[in-house]
Image (spheres, rainbow, N blue to C red):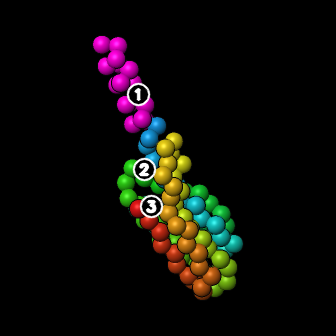
Amino acid sequence: MKILLIILAITMGFIFFGCTDYKAKITSDTSWSGSFGGSTVDGSGNQTIDLPDDEIVCIVVQKETEQGTLSAEIIDEGFLSFGGSEKKTTTAKYGVVSVCNQ
Protein backbone atom coordinates (compact mmCIF):
# COMPACT_ATOMS: atom_id res chain seq x y z
CA MET A 1 0.00 0.00 0.00
CA LYS A 2 2.83 2.41 0.83
CA ILE A 3 4.47 1.72 -2.55
CA LEU A 4 1.19 2.48 -4.34
CA LEU A 5 0.88 5.80 -2.48
CA ILE A 6 4.48 6.71 -3.33
CA ILE A 7 3.93 5.91 -7.02
CA LEU A 8 0.72 7.95 -7.01
CA ALA A 9 2.47 10.91 -5.34
CA ILE A 10 5.31 10.83 -7.87
CA THR A 11 2.90 10.57 -10.79
CA MET A 12 0.78 13.45 -9.53
CA GLY A 13 3.93 15.49 -8.96
CA PHE A 14 4.98 15.00 -12.58
CA ILE A 15 1.51 15.91 -13.81
CA PHE A 16 1.43 19.04 -11.65
CA PHE A 17 4.99 20.18 -12.32
CA GLY A 18 5.06 19.06 -15.95
CA CYS A 19 2.35 21.49 -17.01
CA THR A 20 3.26 24.09 -19.56
CA ASP A 21 3.18 27.80 -18.89
CA TYR A 22 3.14 29.51 -22.28
CA LYS A 23 3.83 33.21 -22.63
CA ALA A 24 4.22 35.45 -25.68
CA LYS A 25 7.35 37.59 -25.43
CA ILE A 26 7.16 40.74 -27.55
CA THR A 27 10.26 42.87 -28.08
CA SER A 28 9.70 46.14 -29.92
CA ASP A 29 10.67 49.80 -30.16
CA THR A 30 7.29 50.77 -31.62
CA SER A 31 3.55 50.27 -31.14
CA TRP A 32 1.90 47.01 -32.19
CA SER A 33 -1.35 45.07 -32.08
CA GLY A 34 -1.94 41.33 -32.12
CA SER A 35 -3.99 38.23 -31.53
CA PHE A 36 -2.76 36.08 -28.65
CA GLY A 37 -4.56 32.77 -28.23
CA GLY A 38 -7.97 34.29 -28.96
CA SER A 39 -7.39 37.62 -27.19
CA THR A 40 -6.52 40.91 -28.88
CA VAL A 41 -3.84 43.07 -27.26
CA ASP A 42 -2.66 46.54 -28.28
CA GLY A 43 0.70 47.57 -26.91
CA SER A 44 4.03 49.23 -27.41
CA GLY A 45 7.57 48.38 -26.45
CA ASN A 46 8.44 45.13 -24.73
CA GLN A 47 5.70 43.04 -23.14
CA THR A 48 5.07 39.49 -21.94
CA ILE A 49 1.53 38.14 -22.38
CA ASP A 50 0.12 35.04 -20.70
CA LEU A 51 -1.28 32.44 -23.14
CA PRO A 52 -3.55 29.42 -22.72
CA ASP A 53 -1.51 26.50 -21.38
CA ASP A 54 -1.48 22.87 -22.50
CA GLU A 55 -2.75 23.54 -26.01
CA ILE A 56 -1.42 24.65 -29.37
CA VAL A 57 -1.45 28.44 -29.56
CA CYS A 58 -0.47 30.78 -32.38
CA ILE A 59 0.07 34.51 -32.17
CA VAL A 60 -0.01 37.13 -34.92
CA VAL A 61 1.41 40.60 -34.19
CA GLN A 62 1.59 43.65 -36.47
CA LYS A 63 3.55 46.87 -36.19
CA GLU A 64 1.40 49.99 -36.24
CA THR A 65 4.18 52.15 -37.67
CA GLU A 66 6.45 52.34 -40.71
CA GLN A 67 9.66 52.47 -38.65
CA GLY A 68 10.98 50.22 -35.92
CA THR A 69 11.50 46.57 -35.15
CA LEU A 70 9.06 43.95 -33.83
CA SER A 71 10.03 40.50 -32.56
CA ALA A 72 7.77 37.80 -31.14
CA GLU A 73 8.28 34.36 -29.67
CA ILE A 74 6.39 31.94 -27.46
CA ILE A 75 8.25 30.75 -24.38
CA ASP A 76 7.38 27.94 -22.00
CA GLU A 77 8.08 28.77 -18.36
CA GLY A 78 6.73 25.44 -17.08
CA PHE A 79 8.75 23.31 -14.65
CA LEU A 80 9.61 20.69 -17.30
CA SER A 81 9.52 23.04 -20.27
CA PHE A 82 10.59 21.82 -23.66
CA GLY A 83 11.49 25.23 -25.04
CA GLY A 84 9.29 27.45 -27.07
CA SER A 85 8.93 28.78 -30.57
CA GLU A 86 11.39 30.22 -33.00
CA LYS A 87 11.80 33.98 -32.59
CA LYS A 88 10.43 35.92 -35.59
CA THR A 89 11.40 39.53 -36.37
CA THR A 90 10.25 42.18 -38.83
CA THR A 91 11.46 45.66 -39.72
CA ALA A 92 9.04 46.05 -42.66
CA LYS A 93 6.57 48.94 -42.77
CA TYR A 94 3.54 47.76 -40.77
CA GLY A 95 5.24 44.34 -40.70
CA VAL A 96 3.60 41.19 -39.33
CA VAL A 97 5.08 38.25 -37.42
CA SER A 98 3.36 34.96 -36.69
CA VAL A 99 4.56 32.13 -34.42
CA CYS A 100 3.08 28.99 -32.88
CA ASN A 101 4.14 26.98 -29.86
CA GLN A 102 4.25 23.69 -31.84
Please provide the residue range marked out in magenta: 1-16
Residue 94 in which image quadrant = bottom right
Tag 1: Cα neighbours inside 10 Å, few (<14), some, or many (≥20)? few
Instruction: State how far apart marks 3 and 1 are (Cα).
Output: 27 Å
> Mark 2 falls on what kind of element?
loop
The type of residue carrying mark 3 is: Asn
Q: Nearer the viewer, residue 75 or 6?
A: 6
Up-down: is 81 above or below 44? above
Residue bearing the label numbered 3:
101
Residue 29 point in image, percent of width and height: 69, 72
The type of residue carrying mark 2 is: Asp
The label shown at residue 10 is: 1
Residue bearing the label numbered 2:
53
Please give the name of the residue rendered at 51% of the width and 55% of the height, measured from the top-left corner.
83
Q: Earlier in the sequence, mark 2 or mark 1?
A: 1
Q: Nearer the viewer, residue 9 or 64?
A: 9
Please give the name of the residue rendered at 54% of the width and 64% of the height, measured from the top-left corner.
73
The type of residue carrying mark 1 is: Ile
Instruction: Give the label, 2 or 1, closer to the camera.
Output: 1
Q: Earlier in the sequence, mark 3 or mark 1?
A: 1
Up-down: is 64 above or below 99? below
Instruction: State how far apart marks 3 and 2 are (Cα).
Output: 10 Å
Please give the name of the residue rendered at 43% of the width and 53% of the height, measured from the top-left corner.
52
Residue 12 forms part of the magenta stretch? yes
Residue 43 forms part of the magenta stretch? no
Main secondary-structure element of the magenta-colored stretch: helix
